Image (tube, rainbow, N blue to C red):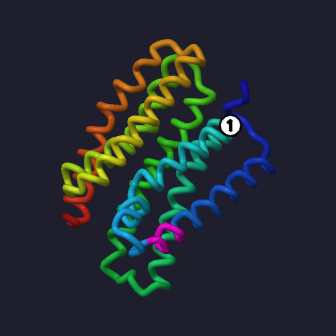
C-alpha cells in the first residue's frame, strides 16, 4: 500500500497546482452556465456538483494527507473562481461577502471530508471503506431531498436522488467485489447520511443565507 504519511515535495506541488487550477475552472464554469436553462442552472449551482469532485480527486491521489488537503484546496479554489467570475460579471455586491464566507467555510470542511472519503474508498482498509462510500454519495442524496422537500423542484429532486442511488449501488458493488467486510453499510449509511446532509443544508441556507 502507498505511504499515507510522507510524499515528495515535487509530487505534492504538482498535485496541489492541478487541484487549484481545476477548482478555479470549476467555479468559473459553474457561474458561466447560470441562466442557460433552469435545469442546468440548478445542476451547476449545487453543492454536490462542486463537492463530489473532491472525492474523485481523493480517489486519484495516492497519499492520504495530500488527498485530504487537496479536497479542501479544491473547494476554496472553486469558491474563488465562482465569485471572481461573479465580480467580473457585475453580480457580486457587498452583501454577497457573507454568503461567500459561508460557502467557503462549509466547502473547505466538506472538501476535507470528501477528499478523505475518495481516498479511503479506493485505498483504505476494512469497514471504513464502506463508511467512506456512504459519505461520498450522501451529498447527492441529501441535495435531492433539499430540492424535493425544501424547494419543491420535484423533477430535479428525482434526478439527484436517482443519480445518488446509482452511485451508491455502484460503490457498494465495487466494495463487495473488493472483499470489503460489511460493504452493506454503504447504502444504509448513505440513506441516513443523505437525511443528515439535507437537514444541515437546510439549516445553512435558512439560518445563515436566508435564501428560502
Q: Horizontally, is 3 left or right of 22 in the view?
A: right
| Percent of width and height locating residue 36 | 42, 74
| Percent of width and height locating residue 83 | 46, 73
- Which stretch is magenta? 28-33
- Using the rendered view, name the quadrant where residue 46 is placed: bottom left
Above or below: residue 149 compared with residue 95: above
Q: Is residue 143 magenta?
A: no
The residue drawn where x is 42% and y is 25% is 186
Give the farthest residue toward the bottom.
Answer: 90
Above or below: residue 88 compared with residue 159: below
Q: Quadrant of the C terminus?
A: bottom left
| Percent of width and height locating residue 121 | 55, 30
Q: Which residue is mark 1?
A: 63
Front residue of 104 and 196:
196
Considering the numbered disc 1 on the image, is that residue within a helix, a strand or a loop? loop
Q: Quadrant of the N terminus?
A: top right
Front residue of 78 and 38:
38
- Using the rendered view, name the quadrant where residue 107 is placed: bottom left
| Percent of width and height locating residue 116 | 54, 38
The residue drawn where x is 54% and y is 22% is 175
- Using the rendered view, name the quadrant where residue 152 is placed: bottom left
Is most of the magenta stretch helix, strand or loop? Answer: helix
Above or below: residue 113 compared with residue 172: below
Above or below: residue 24 compared with residue 193: below
Q: Horizontally, is 35 left or right of 17 in the view?
A: left
The residue drawn where x is 56% and y is 30% is 120
Decide: few, some or many residues near mark 1? Use Cα within 10 Å; few <14, some 14-19, many ≥20: many
The residue drawn where x is 65% and y is 43% is 66
Amino acid at each position: 500500500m502507498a505511504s499515507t504519511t510522507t510524499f515528495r515535495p515535487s509530487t505534492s506541488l504538482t498535485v496541489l497546482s492541478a487541484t487549484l487550477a481545476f477548482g478555479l475552472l470549476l467555479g468559473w464554469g459553474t457561474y458561466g452556465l447560470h441562466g442557460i436553462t433552469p435545469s442546468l442552472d440548478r445542476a451547476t449551482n449545487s453543492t454536490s456538483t462542486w463537492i463530489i469532485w473532491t472525492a474523485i480527486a481523493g480517489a486519484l491521489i495516492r497519499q492520504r494527507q495530500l488527498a485530504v488537503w487537496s479536497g479542501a484546496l479544491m473547494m476554496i479554489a472553486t469558491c474563488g473562481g465562482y465569485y471572481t467570475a461573479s465580480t467580473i460579471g457585475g453580480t457580486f455586491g457587498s452583501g454577497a461577502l457573507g454568503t461567500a464566507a459561508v460557502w467557503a467555510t462549509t466547502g473547505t470542511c466538506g472538501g476535507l471530508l470528501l477528499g478523505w472519503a475518495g481516498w479511503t474508498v479506493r485505498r483504505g482498509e476494512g469497514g471504513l471503506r464502506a463508511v467512506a462510500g456512504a459519505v461520498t454519495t450522501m451529498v447527492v442524496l441529501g441535495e435531492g431531498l433539499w430540492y424535493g422537500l425544501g424547494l419543491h423542484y420535484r423533477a430535479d429532486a428525482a434526478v439527484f436522488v436517482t443519480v445518488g442511488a446509482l452511485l451508491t449501488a455502484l460503490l457498494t458493488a465495487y466494495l463487495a467485489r473488493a472483499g470489503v467486510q460489511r460493504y452493506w453499510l454503504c447504502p444504509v449509511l448513505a440513506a441516513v447520511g443523505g437525511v443528515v446532509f439535507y437537514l444541515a443544508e437546510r439549516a445553512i441556507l435558512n439560518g445563515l443565507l436566508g435564501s428560502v
